[in-house]
Amino acid sequence: MLAPLRRAQRDTAARSVAEVTERTGTGAAVPPELAGLILHCLTNGLVNEHLADPENVTADVIRQAFTAVLTALLPPAANS
């Protein structure tokens, strides 16, 4: 029951990466499917860390983490 839901979440993230790279005419640092997995895992991990330690894993820290990962995954043209 959980696997199809998680797969759909990863697929949605992968499609988003593919759409951004297609729209900007650039390529991601990794295939969209891998980028989707990375973003899905990052989301899950950050949610758990925020729940465990909301004072240190704040919205700003989460934003910084996503910015760092997206900057690494997507070329500069896709980040603008």
Image (cartoon, rainbow, N blue to C red):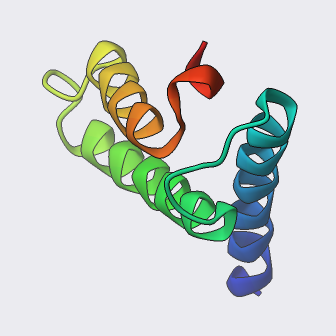
Residue 62 point in image, percent of width and height: 35, 27
Residue 71 point in image, percent of width and height: 42, 31
| In-image side of 61 versus 41 (left or right) | left
Q: Quadrant of the C terminus?
A: top right
Residue 24 point in image, percent of width and height: 78, 28
What residue lies at 22% left-to-right and 29% top-to-bottom? 57
| In-image side of 6 versus 22 (left or right) | left
What residue lies at 77% left-to-right and 65% top-to-bottom? 11
User: Residue lying furthest front in this view?
Assistant: 25
| Foreground residue among 32 and 43 | 32
| In-image side of 74 versus 58 (left or right) | right
Above or below residue 58? Residue 39 is: below
Number of on-image labels: 0
Residue 15 point in image, percent of width and height: 82, 54
| Foreground residue among 29 and 7 | 29
Snapshot quadrant of residue 54: top left
What residue lies at 74% left-to-right and 40% top-to-bottom? 21
Above or below residue 73? Residue 68 is: above
Q: Quadrant of the N terminus?
A: bottom right
| In-image side of 64 versus 2 (left or right) | left
| Foreground residue among 49 and 20 | 20
Snapshot quadrant of residue 20: top right
Above or below residue 58? Residue 30 is: below
What residue lies at 66% left-to-right and 69% top-to-bottom? 33
Snapshot quadrant of residue 4: bottom right
